[in-house]
Image (cartoon, helix red, strand yellow):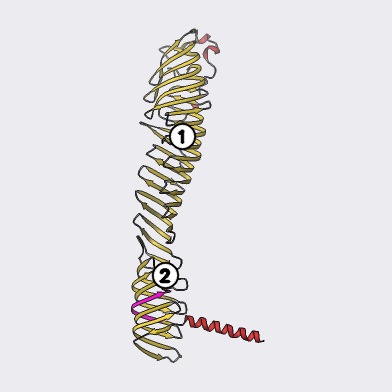
């Protein structure tokens, strides 16, 4: 019984103490008039050096009207509220509700914390949550940062800012424009939604939703985003990218355009570093490389680009690769380009086409000079198929290896070596095949003009035979490995992404 009695008194004491803590007390007033109302309440008219307090909040003003026990008051002129010695709010008109610990302050309002200052026309403040709300366009200043919006809220305890409507975040190093913004001053972090533009140095970022960590310059963007800078453009469904290191990852419909490197990449996933150039891209990958006055288009399942200590790149396009340029096209399982030697290596068993000619072999190396095709090396089971003047039949040649030269990115001359064999067709002026020539020798030289075979020379140990077309055997008409595959020729469309 005694325990219950003591507990009851303790509970009453706690409730009384809590009530005492929330009651508004008069600290000072030059003139005080008290009017007792019929309902028992009292109205205190305070004038001159008015001071009021509720728990840790101290309020001063020129005059005030306090109503008790309703625990509310109105304050006028030179209103100042100090919350726990850290937050100071000033204005010229205040309506304060002590029970809910909320107030509305208006007319030249200024909210100041140790790190920030907010200027507005009217402010609603909830002391329990330490949150200020405003619904007119206002500016919050924090060191070199200015945050302006049509409406917003500011939690002074947790240092969080929520803004909506024509939001502007202007700093000495960057500018952000968005519809909705959540800002965390202690970590200098922004979360934004709606059409957003971020400007930093000479870089422009566009997105619909994202996060920006200003100190580290880290971006996490979604729902379609792009980053553009001089010589560089990035876009993707979502992007994680660091503006300082110029490196990041792109997810979904990813594109990287690097004019300094002369390349454009398109893929579903790209891991990219600008300098030193690093790329990992995955299925499918579309690659464009500037080559003098032409452009090389390529496609594969995966792409890897690495840069050595001297700044030279190695490009590896792997699995189901195909490439296209105006005068030369090909397909291969693997496609490797090395900048140090300016060589493009294709293997295994690549198929290549130039104008009216087709080339197959075990492996191939194309050499470039000043970003233009210069020479061609084919190794192992080399075969050439060239369309004849009648556009029906095919001249053929086989050997162990081939060396070719380009002129203006087109095949100019070839030398086929190692048990070389050649079949050519004799075509009359009516474009009718009259016969077939078959030659075997050590090596064969072929020159081209406007994509067509102009001259063929057989050299060393030449064995030649001729047969009229009608009586020629199948062995005279064809060579092993010389099956025309022109229907498989890579087109430009095949090396470009499908537009959804």
Identify the mark at residue 315; answer none if there is no mark.
1
Question: Residue 175 falls in which quadrant of the image?
Answer: bottom left
Residue appearing at x 36%, y 67% in the figure: 117
Left or right: 259, with 69 as reference point = left
Q: Nearer the viewer, residue 349 or 80?
A: 80
Spatial separation of the CA atoms under disc 1 and disc 2:
56 Å
Can residue 166 be seen here? The reply is: yes
Can residue 477 be found in the magenta stretch?
no
Residue appearing at x 49%, y 13% in the figure: 423
Please tell me how crowded label 1 is: few (under 14), some (14-19), or many (20+) other residues with Cα within 10 Å: some
Can residue 327 be seen here? The reply is: no
Q: Nearer the viewer, residue 352 or 483?
A: 352
Can residue 77 be found in the magenta stretch?
yes
For the stretch drawn in magenta, the main secondary structure is strand
Range drawn in magenta: 73-83
Residue 352: percent from left, percent from top:
47, 25
Q: Secondary structure at mark 1?
A: strand
Q: Secondary structure at mark 2?
A: strand
Residue 16: percent from left, percent from top:
53, 84
Tell me which numbered mark, 1 or 2, is placed earlier along the sequence.
2
Please tell me how crowded label 2 is: few (under 14), some (14-19), or many (20+) other residues with Cα within 10 Å: many
Residue 302: percent from left, percent from top:
51, 37
Identify the mark at residue 132; answer none if there is no mark.
2
Q: Name the image quarter holding the N terminus.
A: bottom right
Is 394 rendered above or below residue 220?
A: above
Left or right: 264, with 347 as reference point = left
């Amino acid at each position: 019984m005694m325990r219950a009695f003591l507990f009851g008194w303790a509970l009453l004491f706690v409730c009384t103490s809590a009530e005492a803590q929330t009651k508004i007390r008069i600290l000072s007033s030059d003139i005080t008039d008290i009017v007792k109302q019929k309902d028992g309440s009292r109205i205190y008219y305070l004038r001159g050096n008015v001071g009021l307090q509720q728990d840790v909040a101290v309020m001063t003003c020129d005059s005030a009207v306090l109503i008790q026990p309703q625990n509310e008051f109105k304050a006028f002129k030179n209103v100042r509220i100090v919350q726990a010695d850290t937050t100071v709010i000033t204005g010229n008109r205040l309506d304060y509700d002590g029970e809910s610990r909320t107030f509305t302050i208006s007319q030249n309002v200024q909210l100041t914390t140790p790190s920030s200052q907010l200027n507005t026309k009217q402010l609603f403040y909830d002391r329990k949550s330490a949150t200020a709300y405003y619904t007119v366009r206002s500016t919050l200043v924090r060191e070199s940062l200015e945050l302006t919006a049509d409406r917003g809220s500011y939690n002074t305890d947790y240092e969080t800012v929520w803004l909506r409507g024509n939001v502007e975040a202007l700093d000495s190093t960057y500018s952000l424009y968005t519809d909705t913004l959540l800002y965390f001053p202690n970590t200098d972090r922004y979360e934004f939604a709606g059409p957003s533009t971020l400007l930093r140095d000479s870089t422009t970022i566009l997105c619909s939703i994202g996060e920006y960590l200003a100190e580290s310059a880290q971006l996490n963007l979604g729902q379609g985003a792009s980053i553009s800078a001089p010589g560089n453009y990035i876009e993707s469904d979502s992007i994680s990218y660091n503006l300082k290191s110029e490196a990041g990852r792109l997810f979904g419909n990813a594109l990287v355009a690097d004019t300094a490197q002369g390349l454009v990449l398109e893929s579903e996933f790209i891991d990219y570093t600008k300098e030193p150039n690093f790329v990992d891209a995955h299925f499918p990958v579309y690659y464009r490389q500037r080559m003098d006055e032409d452009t090389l288009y390529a496609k594969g399942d995966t792409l890897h680009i690495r840069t050595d200590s001297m700044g030279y790149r190695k490009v590896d396009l792997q699995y189901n690769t195909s490439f296209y340029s105006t005068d030369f096209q090909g397909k291969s399982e693997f496609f490797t380009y090395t900048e140090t030697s300016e060589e493009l290596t294709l293997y295994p068993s690549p198929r290549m086409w130039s104008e009216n000619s087709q080339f197959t072999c075990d492996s191939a190396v194309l050499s470039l000079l000043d970003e233009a095709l210069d020479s061609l090396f084919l190794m192992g089971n080399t075969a050439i198929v060239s369309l004849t003047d009648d556009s029906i039949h095919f001249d053929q040649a086989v050997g162990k290896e081939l060396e070719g030269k380009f002129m203006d990115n087109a095949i100019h001359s070839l030398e086929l070596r190692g048990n070389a064999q050649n079949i050519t067709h004799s075509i009359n002026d009516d474009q009718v095949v009259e016969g077939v020539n078959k030659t075997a020798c050590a090596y064969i030289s072929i020159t081209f003009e406007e994509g067509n075979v102009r001259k063929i020379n057989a050299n060393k140990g030449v064995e030649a035979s001729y047969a009229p077309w009608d009586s020629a055997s199948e062995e005279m008409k064809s060579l092993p490995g010389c099956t025309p595959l022109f229907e498989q020729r890579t087109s430009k469309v095949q090396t470009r992404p499908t537009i959804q």
